[in-house]
Each structure stands twice: as structure tokens, then as C-alpha cells.
Amino acid sequence: MNRFLALSGISSRRGAEEYIRDGRVTVNGETTTGLATQVAPGDKVEVDGRIVKNQEFVYLLLNKPAGFLTTRSDERSRNTIYDLLPAELPNLAHVGRLDKESEGLLLLTNDGDLAFRITHPKFKLEKEYLVTLDREFQPKDSPRTQKGVYLSEGRARFDAILKLNSRQVRVVVTQGLKRQVRRIFAALGYKVTRLQRVRIGPLTGRGLRSRDVRSLSQSEVDLLKKPRSGNLSVPVSAGRKKGKIDAMLER
């Protein structure tokens, strides 16, 4: 029951548990206080007398430009990523974040289970970044980035690093610490001048221009839900069926 309520968008799973314990939830007119109560197809579930319906999940991939905050609102009225989305979209949460000056891929969804799978370190979902530095990257520092440097939260490391040219590298991260990429390089004496997230698990931004957003196909969602991350690159599918969310995005 608590999962059903959380997935419906009524509240978080913890909030749903409180509704149930407080006797505010009924199934087919009968009050239930059991967290493990099963909801069958056709059951009428109500919270405080209001019917709860299954929520349609929405999955969006945004290519965030620099200069936008990853937050729903800002007290100083600065630009946020939600300014890039149609106002009539459902209430979507950003999955993880990119700081204001960082660019690249960001997922938005109302599927809390998938968001948890993407952000929790135990699932080791890879995020790949293209990093531009203020000076030439020294090969001797590669092993140090993978062995790890110590930040306030503990040891932070890259899972992989590849030097592309004198000042550009690609790195893969599964930890997800705050501003991890910038802070690791800072600990080694470098300043990141440009940071772009180019991959989230199997998803790449191929064909997605800066500021553009698109919905995920079901096959892409299924890949994200697999219990391991991979190095697959999933391009934009030209044959993907479009729905009402796509129509909103194309306006």
C-alpha cells in the first residue's frame, strides 16, 4: 500500500506510511492500517476521502546549458532548469543535479523508484563527464584520481579516466558526491573550466542539443532499471512512438 501511494504521487513512501498508520487510507470503503496491504486492479483507494489514481510516469532527458540552477525555484529569481520545460508538464523531480555552470544530461521523472536506482551509489550507475581543465593534465595524476583523494565526506575517486588532449579528459563516476569531479581535480591542483555530463548509464545525449529535452522510450527506461550499469550508447530512436508528453515538448 505504501508503495502504491508513493507511486501515485500523493507523497513520499515515508509520508504514505504516516497516512496509513493514522487511518486516513481506505480501500473499497474500509479503513486500512496495514503497510503491507495489497492493492488489486479495480480497488478503490482513497486518502482523506479523495480517490487515488495510478500516476502515469514521465521520463525526460534534458541537455542542461550553463547558467541554469538545478532547483525548482530560486529566491533570487535566477534561471532554473524548470524554466526550460513546458509549464503544463506533471510535477517532475530532477534526478541528481548539475551545478549552475555545469552542462549536459539531466533526468527528470515522477518515478521515485527509478530516481533512487539512478542516484544511490549501491547501484553503481555510471555517469560520464567531459572535463576541460585550466592547464595540461599530467599522466602521473591518473592513478591518483582512481585510487582516490580525501574530501570531507571521505575518499572520492573516478572509476575511469581517459586523457583526450592536453587539457581535456573523460571521467566515469559512480559515487555521486556533491561537486565530486570539480573537487577531485581541485585537490590535485587543477581548475575545471568546463564540465559536461555526456552519459547517464546507457543514455547519451546523441542528437540532443543544448536546452533541448525529450522523453525516454520504454526500452531506455528498461535499460536504466537493469541491475547493472553498462557502456551501451542509446541513440535517439527515430521510430519511437510519440505521446502527449512529446506533443507538449514540441510546442
Image (tube, helix red, strand yellow):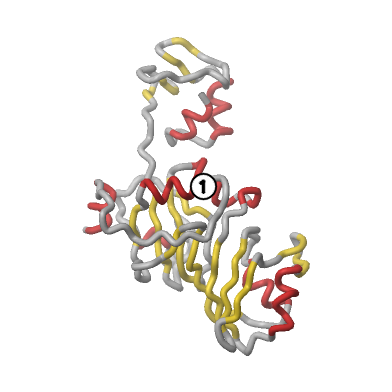
Residue at image point 35% right, 38% down: 56
Residue at image point 48% right, 57% down: 202
Q: Which residue is mark 1?
A: 115
Q: Residues within 10 Å of mark 1 (few under 14, many from 20)?
A: some
- SS for callout 1: helix
Observer-nearest residue: 239 or 118?
239
Observer-nearest residue: 207 or 193?
207
The answer to whether 71 is drawn above or below residue 16 in the figure is below
Quadrant position of the C terminus in the picture: bottom left
Q: Is residue 121 left or right of residue 20?
A: right
The answer to whether 39 is drawn above or below residue 234 in the figure is above
Q: Is residue 95 left or right of residue 205?
A: right
Observer-nearest residue: 42 or 199?
199
Q: Position of residue 206 (x, y in %)?
A: 38, 67
Q: Is residue 40 left or right of residue 237?
A: right
Q: Position of residue 122 (x, y in %)?
A: 65, 48
For the image, the number of numbered tags is: 1
